[in-house]
């Protein structure tokens, strides 16, 4: 055997060895098929396969963050909104993710869009805005149930943004303003009611002890004098005037 033949044989051997050696990272698994039949998942690390007989498909086990495109949804109370979301999922069964579905990422995306429209279409607008956490849990449960046969685990679904029509936004703003005015009027009325109660109590005390009116008169004079005004107004108690009127009648 000449040198040229030896070199060719060595190249062929090295080429076959290179096809046989496979390396899979810690976050990956290699799903092996032998003549079309599933053998199993291997990894992480280095292992060997039979060239031209075995075929390996790498599957990533890391969490995938997938944006659900904005969907137009008609709520239960006939309001048209556009909603988008984000889904977090990962592969827990590499073999099922390769054998039972053609593209598990695209399939998860499609089922997420469909579920988003169906679930939010059964909810009213107020529930969509105020009970988002409950809707997130419902979406996660339904999507995870559909993707479980594919070896995909959906961990979290979050509704990111709800776009309302301009007319609906104006109506909600007017409603919120009316609600704030209603609360302000109620608070003002409660303040007036409490003040009237205190005034009634004060009037009762003054009626029982007339001297308190004189003390209040002196306190008023003190407050006016402390302002350093050029003009002073001295309030005269009605009781003092009535006293002189009674003497004049006599």
Image: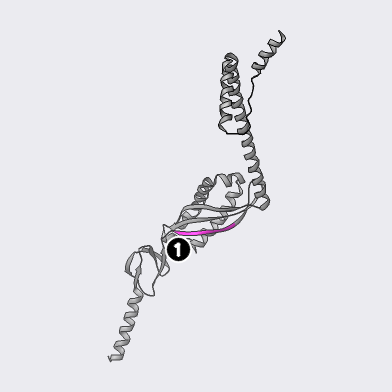
Q: Position of residue 196 (x, y in %)?
A: 61, 25
Question: Callout 1: 10 Å neighbours few (<14), some, many (20+)?
Answer: some
Is residue 68 one of those drawn in magenta? yes
| x and y, in percent, of residue 47 in the image | 32, 68
Q: Which residues are magenta?
A: 61-70
Q: What colouring does the structure picture have?
A: one colour
Please provide percent x and percent y for residue 102: 50, 64
**At 58% across and 20% down in the image, what residue appears?**
202
Q: Is residue 44 above or below residue 234?
A: below
Q: Residue furthest top?
A: 250
Q: In the image, 65: left or right of 119?
A: left
As displayed, is residue 128 above or below residue 66?
A: above
Answer whether residue 104 is magenta in the image: no
Q: Residue at x 56, y 29 (%)?
A: 223
Q: Is residue 200 above or below residue 13?
A: above
**Which residue is at the front of the view, 63 or 172?**
172
Tell me which secondary structure the magenta stretch mostly adopts: strand
- According to the picture, the residue beneath numbered tag 1 turns out to be 98
* Quarter of the figure with residue 234: top right
Q: Nearer the viewer, residue 127 or 114?
A: 127
Q: Is 66 on the left or on the right of 221, as rendered?
A: left
Q: Please identify the quarter of the rendering in which residue 236 is found.
A: top right
């Amino acid at each position: 055997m000449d040198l040229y033949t030896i070199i060719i044989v060595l190249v062929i051997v090295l080429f076959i060895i290179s096809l046989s050696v496979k390396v899979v990272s810690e976050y990956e698994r290699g799903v092996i098929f032998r003549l079309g039949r599933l053998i199993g998942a291997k990894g992480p690390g280095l292992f060997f396969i039979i060239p031209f007989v075995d075929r390996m498909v790498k599957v990533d086990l890391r969490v995938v963050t997938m944006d659900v495109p904005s969907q137009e949804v008609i709520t239960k109370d006939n309001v048209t909104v556009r909603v988008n979301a984000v889904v977090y999922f990962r592969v827990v069964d590499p073999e099922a993710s390769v054998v039972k579905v053609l593209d598990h990422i695209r399939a998860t995306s499609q089922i997420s869009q469909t579920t988003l429209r169906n679930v939010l279409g059964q909810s009213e607008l107020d529930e969509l805005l105020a009970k988002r956490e409950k809707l997130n849990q419902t979406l996660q449960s339904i999507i995870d149930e559909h993707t479980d046969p594919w070896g995909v685990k959906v961990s979290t679904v979050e509704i990111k943004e709800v776009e309302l029509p301009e007319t609906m936004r104006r109506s909600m703003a007017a409603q919120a303003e009316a609600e704030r005015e209603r609360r302000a009027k109620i608070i003002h009325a409660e303040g007036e009611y409490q003040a009237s109660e205190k005034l009634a109590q004060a009037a009762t005390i003054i009626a029982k002890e007339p001297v308190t009116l004189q003390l209040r008169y002196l306190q008023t004079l003190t407050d006016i004098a402390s302002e350093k005004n050029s003009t002073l107004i001295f309030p005269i108690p009605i009781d003092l005037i009535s006293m002189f009127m009674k003497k004049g009648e006599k």
